[in-house]
Every structure is written in C-alpha cells, then in structure tokens.
Image: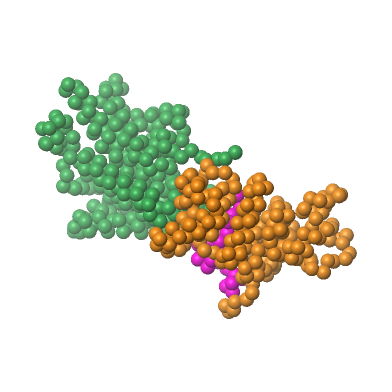
Amino acid sequence: MNVPTDNILEIDSIEVVYDNVISALHDVSLTVPRGKVVALLGGNGAGKSTTLKAISTMLASEKGKVTKGTITYDGTPVKGQTPAEMVGLGMVQVLEGRRCFGHLTVEENIIAGAYSRRLSKAEMRNELEKIYGYFNRLRDKRKSQAGYTSGGEQQMVAVARAMMAKPRMLLLDEPSMGLAPQLVAEIFRIVTELNQNEGVSILLAEQNTNVALRNADYGYIIETGHVMLHGTAESLLNDDSVRDLYLGISKEGRKNFRDVLRQESAVHPDLHHG
Amino acid sequence: MTEFLFFIEVVVAGLLAGTMYSLVALGFVLIYKASSTFNFAQGAMVFFAVLAFVGFMELGLPFVVAFFVTILLMGLVGFCTERLVLKPLRTQSEDTLLMATIGLGFVLEGLAQATWGVEVRRLDLGIGDFPIQWIIDSTGLFISALDLTAGFVAAFLIIALALLFKYTKMGLGLRAVADDPGAASSIGIPLGNIMLLVWTAAGIVALVAGMMWGARAGVQFALVDLALKALPVLIIGGFSSIPGAIIGGLIIGATEKVLEVYVGPYFGGAIEGWAPYVMAILFLLWRPEGLFGEKIIRRV
C-alpha cells in the first residue's frame, strides 16, 4: 500500500457535501509533487478553502464530508483521521484569516505550534531561533500579545506556528488576505524560502492570482467546485483567458470561465481543462 | 476600638468565606475558558463530589484514600462528559452546550442521591468551626479555624492552577483552545484531551469546595444552590479570568458579610442571600465584561 510516489498529495475527483445537503465541491482532482508549491486559484466560494479542509480533515468540525473520490497523502489514504492525527503525519493547515491566539504572546503562539512534538527546552530554543531566522520581524514582537500585532505580523505568526509542527506538507489558505502589497511580497518570500530550505511541500489557496502564480510551480483554477484549468504556473500566467479573468488586464468586461472555454477553439498545449 | 475590631472581624470572615466562592467560580472559569459555556452542572458537581467522598469514608476508606478515589471518580465524570456529551455536540452552538450542562446537572444530582441516599451527612474534617485562641490573644480578633483553613486551601489551589496554566504545555494548550478551538486543532492540539483536563480540574475544585462547605453546613442538596453564588462572583470578576474569579469571590464574600451585619437589620436581616445578586446587577450596568474579563480584542 504505502508506496512512496513523487507526489506527496493526490486528490482524485472528490465531492464534498456540507450538512448532508449543500454540495461545495463536485469534481476536484489535483496533485502536489513532493517539494513543490502548487497554487489553488479561484474567486470567493469557488471551493478553495473546502478543498484544503477536506485534505486536513478540518471539514468534520464544520459538518462537511467527502462523499466521493479519494485523498492520498504520502501513500496514506486520508479518511476519518482527526486534524491532530494529520498534524502528527506532517500535514498542517494555516487557516484563512490568520486565526492567531489573540490573548497569547507571539512567542506562546509559536510554541503552541510545536504541541504535537516532544521537545526539550534546548530543542525548543533551537527551533524558535530557526523560526525567528525566517520571520525576523517576529523576534522583536515576541513578548507582545498577538491580538494587538498588525495583520501582516499575525499572518507571519500563523505560518511560523504551523512550521513549528515540522510539517512535510503545508496548506496555506489565502495568506495575502487583507494585506498591503509589500507585506504580501514579504510573506511569499518567506514561504518560498521555507519551501526551498526546509523542503516542505505547499498547497496554496489564493485569490491573488498574480502573486500566487509568480511563487508557485503549478496552478489549478477552480470555479463553483470544479477544476476549470490547470497547468504550470508560467503557462497560466501567459494564458489569455487567465489574464482576462484573474489578472485584471482584460479589455472587455469580466466573464465567467465557462464562457471563455466555450469561445476558445485552440487549446494551449501546456494547459489541461478540468 | 471594639467597634473597629468587630468590623475587621466581619471583613476577615467575609474574605475567608469569599475564597470558597472564588474556588467554585474557578471551576466555572476553567470550563468557560475552554468551551465558552457556562457550566450549569458545576453546583451538581460540588454536591456529587463531596457526597461521593463522604460515601467512601463511610465505606471505611481512610481520609486520604477517599480523597484520591473521589478525584479519580471526578476524572471519570470528566471523561464521560467529554465522550458522551461534549464530543457529540462539538459542532453545535454554545447555547446547545449550555442546555446540555443543565441536563448533566440533573443527571449528576440524581446519580449521587440514588447511590448514596438523600439524608444530610456530617463531614468532620477534624477542624473546628471555632475561633482560634492564639489569634484572639494576640489581636483580639475572633477568626474561625475552619474559615482560615478554607482560605489557605483555596489560595493554594488557585495558585497551583494559575501556575499550571501559565507554565505547562497542557496549560498553553488550554489557553490556545480558549482563544480559538479551530486554530488550536489545526496545529494538532487534541481538543478532547484538553476538555478532559479541564473537567477533571473543575471536578477537583468542586470536591475541595464541597468539603469545606460540607464541613460547615452538612453535606446536603443545598450545596447545589450555594454553588450558584459563583454567578455574581463571575459577573463581577469576569467569566474568563482566573484572577477575576479570585478577586470577585473576595469582594462578594467581604461585602455580603459587611452588608449583612451593618445594613441587614434595616431589611429584617438575611440579606446575604440576595445582596450579591443586587451587586451583580449594578456591576452589569457599570462594567459588563467584569473587572478582569478579557475584552474582546478586535482590530478594525
């Protein structure tokens, strides 16, 4: 069973239903190659967060269920595990909206990230130093109550906290949300460093298509619970329909992806329609 | 001078009685912090714990053994509560949980009485409810030995719990869950274990409070209502604050005694029973989050 493949994560046509009636994902398949950054793109309500929560098993606490298809993480089928068990397997999700522990200090937040690991005091110090090496800004703020730090700092706390669990796979849900462009750039720079230096594979849900594709290896575009288009980050960045719809450089008014696909006759060789 | 000494006596007795309110309030705070639910079963837990303790003593277990067996039993109650009540309701609203704790209260009361009977028991801790001679000799104050012991025990428990939350891994986990259970579970903090810890701690607190009150008033059903005195304590101190529970308990204890002695006669006495609730209402008007309640931190 547990044959390691080149893909750390394989999702095969999953369907997700909330509360037994509301269907959120219809047919989503994607793969994350080991050590790569994959972007999951789409607008509000497209199903990005739902996809991530299906993978981290956080769905269960929101009455959501994977009703069809399979998720395989590093050779292990994801089915019925608790989020804590997934963290134990090396998969950590950074939830949308940062979700810091507001009344804890920045450092306590980061230490809480290592809850699943047994670390001695000295090991903890080392790990913290390593994390502060990536997130310089947090070193000065470490005694501040997290709830009173800026949005960018809170996002960094959330990512730093997740990294303390020593994940092999990180799920990032809209790290750019509500942040100034310089901060978005800083966070993506750190995420890229973490990917390259720590070897952590990353699945990244974003509305900010431009930034996400510039920092990813591969991209998937989903709309109303379906994968519409996927391809290498480069090919998506250069694709006319993507530029039209998601990069805001369209000459005409905004369209729906379905319409674009219908109009398109020639298919780009690197792109695969979902 | 004797007037003043008498006033001091009243205040000290009030403060010492207040530590007991603090202790019960602490039980509420623990559970409120972890699950944002007011645990209406806390009073029943006080009754359940001390009745079981007295029951074990009557079966012939020595004091210390009975004490630890009861703690184990409260751990078991916590475990069953987590598995049978909280876990199935985890995705439900806080109101649902509140209703569930009311139900849990009835179950615990019934279970305790069905097992051990309904008559009032005497609990002798070997500490008399009399003034201590050397304190009378040195200061002229009449302070009850039981009050003083209860004060010290409560203070000890409170300090121990505060240290536990501030400096241990479990404590950090609890504070994380208190802030954001979803985020806590996303980084691998097992919610079930934290709940178990909290309910067991609340059970121990309930046992100790029940023993102190039971030693004075007898182990009886009225303990359930006495525990509700923690409500005004929490309103004054703040629902989510451990220091708040302590200070709130002391304030209620001292003021209710002072009011009873100096204002009570004008109302025909026995205002202890309702004065704290009036204070709580006034407090709600002035500072709804309580003295130490954590203000909701919200960036705009």
Task: Tell me which chain appears green.
Answer: B
Residue B90, image x and y in percent?
Answer: 51, 54
Q: Which is nearer the eye, A193 or A169? A: A193
Query: Residue at the spot x=88%, y=60% of the render?
Result: A263
Q: Please name the color used to draw chain A.
A: orange
Q: Residue at x 57, y 52 (%)?
A: A156
Does residue A76 appear to the left or right of A113 in the view shown?
Answer: right
Would you place residue B73 above or below residue B130 in this image? below
Part of the protein shown in magenta: A72-99
Q: Position of residue A102 (x, y in %)?
A: 51, 46
Residue drawn at point x = 27 percent, y = 37 percent: B17
Magenta-colored stretch includes residue A78: yes
Q: How many marks?
A: 0
In the rendered image, residue B255 lying in the magenta stretch gets the answer no
Foreground residue among A114 and B25: A114
Left or right of B41 on screen, residue B146: left
